[in-house]
Amino acid sequence: MDTVTALLKRSKELLADFNIDDHPLTKFTTGDDDHVGDDYFLTSGDKIRFFLEQDALDQDGKLTRPKEKAVNKIGHALHELDPLFWKVTLENQRIKQLVRDLRFHRDPVALQSMVITKQQQIGGEVPEHNDSTFLYTDPPSALGFWIPLEKCTAENGALSFLPGSHLTTPITKRFVRLPTGGTGFEQLPVPSNNHTPLSTGEYVLECCEPGDLVLIHGSVLHKSEKNLSPKTRFAYTFHMIESPPHATYDEKNWLQPTKAMPFSRVLA
Ligand SMILES: O=C(O)CCC(=O)C(=O)O
């Protein structure tokens, strides 16, 4: 079986096996004012957890479809806990060689992984954002590896990007754990020497095939539309950041390494 088929099969097994009866029904929301931030989310960095599509619950909080078709994403430690995802992410010689060739990082660590399912009919929109806002380091250093497990088209919510925005869009806010609980955004000072014009122009849709690799610069603006089509759009994605002393990652970030599960070095 090829790797992409195996990853898709494993993702579907995880969906079939998870227990909805003891699930807190946490939805994955991405808006500026209502980003997910409950305990189930905040303690998911070293676990394999299941976040629901916003439209998967009715007004009484009951699932409107089978649980396999209700999950928006699985995260955030697939690459640490599941042998297949571990192999594809951290024992993958092609990924390691690519990381060396890119020279984007000196000593990267993998800090999170997700299967984004983008369910048929209800797959949620992901609004415009850049990843260094959510995986903040000083200086910003996030890099996303995004691998479609199914064909991605305009109909089922392929990613789109604002070309050049990684060069013109400063990271102006960061997603943090709030001292009062939950999550929110902290504004960052824009460097006084930043004279770059703000990004303008048209988003470009990137349709792609299963097994392609989409590399996402931490500052590039990107988004995906709601999936109203009858086809799912499964993708596996993981992110890397630079490690100290080249960049700092502090305790304000929502995702925290633990003693038992520190972020794994990619080139070790
Ligand atoms: O898969 C999607 O639709 C969104 C993914 C994304 O924005 C990301 O991985 O940063």
Image (tube, helix red, strand yellow):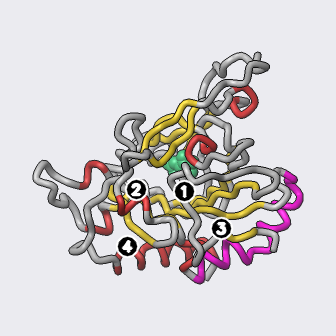
Q: Which mark is residue 151?
A: 1
> In the rendered structure, does residue 93 fall within the stretch colored magenta?
yes
Whether ligand 1 has any atom under 8 Å from the Cβ at mark 2 is answered as no
Dot 1 or dot 3: first in sequence order is 1
Q: CA distance from mark 1 to mark 4?
A: 20 Å
Q: CA distance from mark 2 to mark 4?
A: 17 Å
In terms of secondary structure, where does tag 2 sit?
Answer: loop
In terms of secondary structure, where does tag 3 sit?
Answer: loop
Q: Are marks 2 and 1 in contact (CB under 8 Å)?
A: yes
Q: Quadrant of residue 189?
A: top right
Q: Quadrant of residue 147?
A: bottom right
In terms of secondary structure, where does tag 1 sit?
Answer: loop
* Residue indicated by mark 2: 231
Where, quadrant-wise, is the N terminus in this rendering? bottom right
Residue 246, percent from left and from top: 81, 52
Dot 1 or dot 4: first in sequence order is 4
* Residue indicated by mark 3: 263
* Residue indicated by mark 4: 15
